[in-house]
Amino acid sequence: MLVIPAIDIMNGQCVRLVKGDFEQRTVYSDDPATIALDFARAGATRLHVVDLDAARGEPDNRIVVERVIEAGLTVQVAGGVRTAAQVEAWIGAGAGAVVMGTSAVRDPGLLAECATRYPGHLMAALDVRDGQPAVSGWTETEPLDISVLIPRWNVLPLAGLILTCTERDGTLSGPDVATLARVLSMTHLPVQYGGGISSLNDIRKVREAGAAGVILGRSLYEGKLSLEQALAL
């Protein structure tokens, strides 16, 4: 199972939110690229990078994200990717994978077009709140059950799915193993899990459930977890 540190970027800074609430923001660094280098030195091979401003439809942090990509790790870029031109631009900039969230839910034709054009380079983000997909930077939910959504994605040449349980994200309250198990039962695609991870035991639970990767955020930034220990596990 991959252990994937997360770098969330807002106003050019590395931040973490609680449950996706932009008002509950903690700034951890003014230089996300330096954080990426620190993760690389600790042994990480892949990063999950989210442009929070772009996710809300505000001016993006493209230059900052490009600097993170230059750190040399495989970067999966997320946040506000809503056109084929954006997908092409990120792949051209060296992103290892491009993550579509709102578009994957609301514009299945676009996701299918991009996945077919770049097989193995597109990922679909399944951000779940109250059993429904959360979209537009988690500010809205879509009245669509995941049991309808996931089968649409299963037929595409995606690199995988990213499941984030938004009620747990940034809370350090433990993973939502039940939702993870439900999603895993619906798809053959690799699934990465994020939300609530606070300990090595939480990582074990996600691994034992069958996830292909676990995304770590606040637990790393606040020293609840050592990245080296998580990678060794």
Image (cartoon, grey):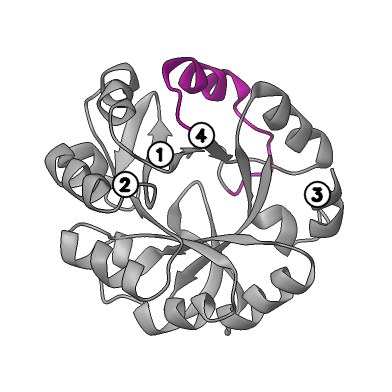
The residue lying toward the viewer, choosing from 49 and 14, is 49
The residue lying toward the viewer, choosing from 26 and 134, is 134
Q: Work out whether mark 1 precedes mark 4 in sequence or the reverse, and give the earlier one.
A: 1
- Name the residue rendered at 57%, 38% in the picture: 168
Q: Do tag 1 and tag 2 residues touch (Cβ < 8 Å)?
A: yes
On the image, the x and y values in percent for residue 98 come to 37, 57
In the rendered image, which residue does mark 3 sit on?
Answer: 230
In the rendered image, which residue does mark 1 sit on?
Answer: 127
Which quadrant of the rendered structure holds the C terminus?
Answer: top right
- Name the residue rendered at 32%, 73% in the picture: 92
- Name the residue rendered at 26%, 62% in the picture: 87
On the image, the x and y values in percent for residue 131 come to 39, 23
Single out the mark in the foreground, 4 or 2.
Answer: 4
Residue 190: image tag: 4
CA distance for labels 1 and 3: 24 Å
The stretch drawn in magenta includes residue 8: no
Q: Do tag 3 and tag 4 residues touch (Cβ < 8 Å)?
A: no
CA distance for labels 3 and 2: 27 Å
